[in-house]
Amino acid sequence: MSDTLPAPAAADPVAAKPDRLATIKAEASKLKTEASTKARSAAEEGKTRAAETLGSVSHVTREAADKLKGTQAEPLANIINSAADSVESFAQRMREKTVDDIIDDTREMVRRSPVLVIAAAAAAGFIISRFLKASRNDDVEA
C-alpha cells in the first residue's frame, strides 16, 4: 500500500462549460441593453438639439427677412420668410416625433428616393466640409 492518497477528482470541465456560456450570454445581453439605452438617449438628445438649432435658424432667418421689408428687396424677404416657415415646420415635426419615428421616416424616404437622399448627403457633406474649412482658417488667423 502506498502512503499517498489519490488526488481528488477535478471538477468536470464539460459541466462547467454550459455555466460559462450562460454567463457570457447574460453579460453580452446586459452590454447590448446598456449600449442600446445609451444610444437611444444620445439620439434623443441629438434630436432635441437639432430641433432647437433649427428653431434658432428659423428665428434668425425671419429677423433677416424683416430687415428687408420696406426695401426694394421685399420680394426676397417673402421668399426668406417662406424658407423660415419650412425650417420651423421641420423643427416642430422633429420635436413631436420619437427617434424611432424619425428612423422609420428616414428608411421610407431612402426606399422611395435613394437618389435624392444620396444627393442630399453629398450636399450636406460639402456644406459641412466648407464650414469646417472656414472654421479652421479662422482659428489659424486668430
Image (cartoon, rainbow, N blue to C red):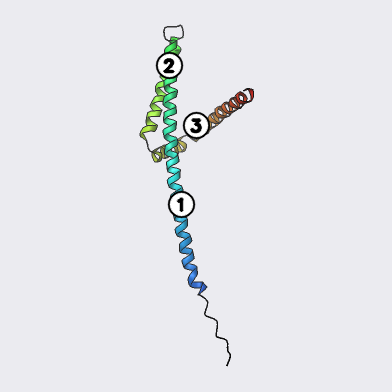
Q: Is residue 30 above or below residue 70?
A: below
Mark 3 belongs to which amino acid? Leu
Residue plotted at (52% across, 76% down): 10
Residue plotted at (43% across, 51% down): 33
Q: Is residue 12 above or below residue 139?
A: below
**Which of disc 1 and disc 3 is earlier in sequence?**
1
Task: Give the residue at mark 3.
Answer: 116
Quadrant (top left, top right, bottom left, bottom right) of the N terminus: bottom right
Q: Please give left or right for residue 128 compared with residue 106 in the image.
A: right
Element under disc 1: helix
Q: Nearer the viewer, residue 96 or 137?
A: 137
Measured in 3D between alpha carbons, the distance from the residue under mark 2 to the one under mark 3, in whole angstroms, is 31 Å
Task: Give the residue at mark 1.
Answer: 32
Mark 2 belongs to which amino acid? Glu
Q: Is residue 79 at least partly visible in the picture?
A: no
Residue plotted at (45% across, 40% down): 42
Q: Is residue 139 at least partly visible in the picture?
A: yes
Mark 2 packing: few (<14 Cα in 10 Å), some, or many (20+)? some
Mark 1 packing: few (<14 Cα in 10 Å), some, or many (20+)? few
